[in-house]
Amino acid sequence: MMRKQFAGLMWSVTASLLVISTAHASGSVEAGETKAAVCKGCHGEGGIKPILPEYPMIGGQHQDYIVAALQQYKTGKRKNASMNGFAGALSPQDILDLAAYFSSQKSELKMKY
């Protein structure tokens, strides 16, 4: 019985550490700004004014959403020829940096209630 309790405790500690380390993974707004130069061709400066209506505004979007979207484009779970190609070349740190940059932008997506 004691072994099961110890194993359960160790599992809980390990899981907690994984959650904590993931939660603290962050990107650099400055690095993201540099990496986002190619993004403005479609999404506009800062991701705020897309050049065509079918391109989404990503400036001001939630950081976690941007990370998830880029990861899904990278793996092919989301389908878009341009984005799949672009995201396929991104490292995990690139994704965090881009998400930090775009989420830091002031836009209509950040409404005050």
Image (tube, rainbow, N blue to C red):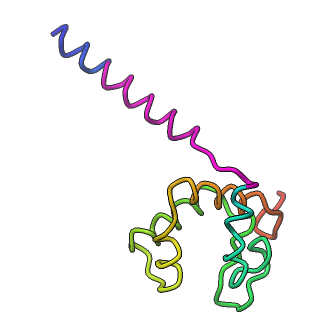
Residue 72 vs residue 9, the one in the foreground: 72
Residue 102 higher or lower than 13, as above or below: below
Where residue 71 appears, as percent x and y from the top left, is 47, 63
Q: Quarter holding the N terminus? A: top left
Residue 25 higher or lower than 55, as above or below: above
Q: Is the magenta stretch mostly helix, strand or loop?
A: helix
Q: Quarter holding the C terminus? A: bottom right
For residue 104, what is the image quadrant?
A: bottom right
Residue 25 on the magenta segment = yes
Residue 101 on the magenta segment = no
Residue 11 vs residue 43, the one in the foreground: 43
For residue 49, what is the image quadrant?
A: bottom right
Residue at image coords 68%, 84%: 42
Please, which residue is most extreme toward the left here?
1
Please, which residue is most extreme toward the top here?
2
Where residue 19 appears, as percent x and y from the top left, is 47, 36
Numbered range of the magenta stretch = 10-30
Residue 72 higher or lower than 25, as above or below: below
Residue at image coords 80%, 76%: 45
For residue 23, what is the image quadrant?
A: top right
- As drawn, is 32 to the left or to the right of 82? right
Total marks drawn? 0
Residue at image coords 74%, 73%: 47
